[in-house]
Amino acid sequence: MNKTITALATPPGVGGIAVIRISGDEAISISDACFSGKISLLESKSHTIHYGTIQYNDRIIDTVTAAVFRSPNSYTGDNVVEISCHGGMVVASEIIEIMIANGAVQAEAGEFTKRAFLNGKLDLTQVEAVADIIHSLSVPGCMTAARQLTGEFTARLKALRVKLLDIASLLELELDFSEEDIEFTNRDNIKLLIKETRDYCNDLADSFKSAEILRSGFFVAIAGYPNSGKSTLFNTLLQRKRAIVSEIPGTTRDYLEEMIYSNGIAIRLTDTAGLRPSENIIEIEGIKLVETVMEQSDLILIINDISISPGNSDKLLKTIKAKYTNSKAYLLQNKIDKVDSAQLDTLSPESENEIRISAKKGIGVDTLKEILEKEASQSIDRTKDILVNQRHALLLRQSALELSNALTAIESNLENEIIAIDIRSSAKTLGEITGDTWDEDVLNNIFSRFCIGK
Ligand SMILES: Nc1nc2c(ncn2[C@@H]2O[C@H](COP(=O)(O)OP(=O)(O)O)[C@@H](O)[C@H]2O)c(=O)[nH]1
Ligand SMILES: [Mg+2]
């Protein structure tokens, strides 16, 4: 018998309604013990909703509706009751305490979904899709996760595995007839099939970075020397005063992060502390944080105060480009309003990935916004309608490697048996993605992204 778990499924606090979930063999009897309605929950059919009250020690706690789902037709696969009560700080926790007094235990983070996995209701890619839907910051990200939840990724992986296992079986069958020198399978066809599958696995693995951007947004870091106008640009892009702007250098000590949305994609803008050798301890901490931000960023905007000189930040630009090779960098020549047009004409023309702006006056900001939109949408071009995560990417690469081994084995005219072993292990690796085999560490890692009640 599995223990019955309970938790609040909605965010805590004041709200229209709160939903308490109870799941396990005893879910219906435990709920029924404190529920009073027209019929008892124990007698109710699956997928029915009942109006009534929750009572404890002759005290009415709230009027509620209780939805009953009988095993195996529920989210977790267990018996499940979902009680909707009035939202607020007190009622929902009282009801949870009553359920616990009646024999349920408090659920851990993600425990409902973990049960769904262990009961075979969802595979691992679907579990991950649930987490992605909850955390998604972009419309396309959420839609892709929703498709993944219906089992689309699973179906694709299954098709690949069937193909690989078929090839392995053919090769092994040939082995049985080796005396008769029969070749069931054309080597060129086999090679082609393996190559196609390997390339597909690698392509999918490559889409990981794009999927990350769909999941968490496109990270744009604003960097530059103190006073170059980073905070001013940050505020202009956000269209509100979020960061403190001041002529005193070193005002932004840590970093600020805000989101802007473009075509459904989240762009995470960060305003950072000015980069310069500093004596001030807090500022040094801030500068360390900048480095972390820059490492994570997809795009870096380096702001230069052109009124000092167009080449004033060249050294910084060079350092940043050399250090953060994964992110594209743009040089923004700021404060062009301070430079008169005659003087601007004498300056060398803008080079590639360089734009002239005035963060304060809004000059060139629309062009910059267009660039951000273009870069963000290009960065998700690689997605293959699947939110590949790091775990998937690692397994896909491993699987591709095993297929490369199989190809080498074929080319070296090795025994069918050896070739088949590589192909079978590649299929097995693909199976780990959906969770055909798993270990506790993998599960814990996945469920650590969940909240209590999910
Ligand atoms: N004239 C002019 N001043 C600017 C512009 N951008 C920023 N500033 C000024 O430069 C100073 C420093 O700006 P701030 O945004 O705090 O720079 P940060 O240290 O890089 O964050 C402030 O006095 C701003 O008003 C601009 O485009 N034109
Ligand atoms: Mg600042």
Image (spheres, rainbow, N blue to C red):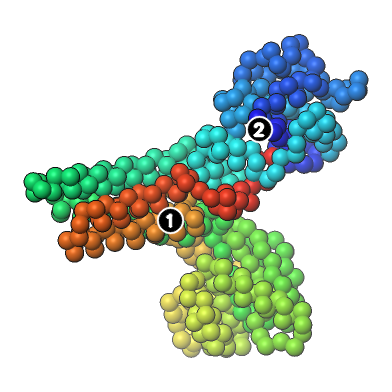
User: In this orientation, which residue lies closer to the viewer: 192 or 4?
Assistant: 4
Q: Is residue 325 left or right of residue 95?
A: left
Q: Cα distance, mark 2 to mark 1?
A: 32 Å
For residue 96, say whether it is visible: yes
What residue sits right under mark 1 in the picture? 395
Q: Position of residue 105 (x, y in %)?
A: 75, 36
Q: Residue at x 26, y 47 (%)?
A: 168
Rendered view: 389 above or below 232 = above
Within 10 angstroms of label 1, few (less than 14), some, or many (20 or more) residues?
many
Rendered view: 358 above or below 258 = below
SS of the residue under disc 1: helix
User: In this orientation, which residue lies closer to the viewer: 237 or 118?
Assistant: 118
For residue 183, say whether it is visible: no
Q: Residue at x 17, y 45 (%)?
A: 176
Q: Is residue 170 left or right of residue 286?
A: left
Q: Quadrant of residue 320?
A: bottom right
Q: Quadrant of residue 151?
A: top left
Q: Which mark is residue 2?
A: 2
Q: Position of residue 72 (x, y in %)?
A: 56, 26
| Closer to the eye: label 2 or 1 | 2
Q: Residue at x 74, y 28 (%)?
A: 84
Q: Quadrant of residue 233?
A: bottom right
Q: Residue at x 50, y 74 (%)?
A: 329
Q: Which mark is residue 25?
A: none
Within 10 angstroms of label 2, few (less than 14), some, or many (20 or more) residues?
few
Rendered view: 243 above or below 137 = below
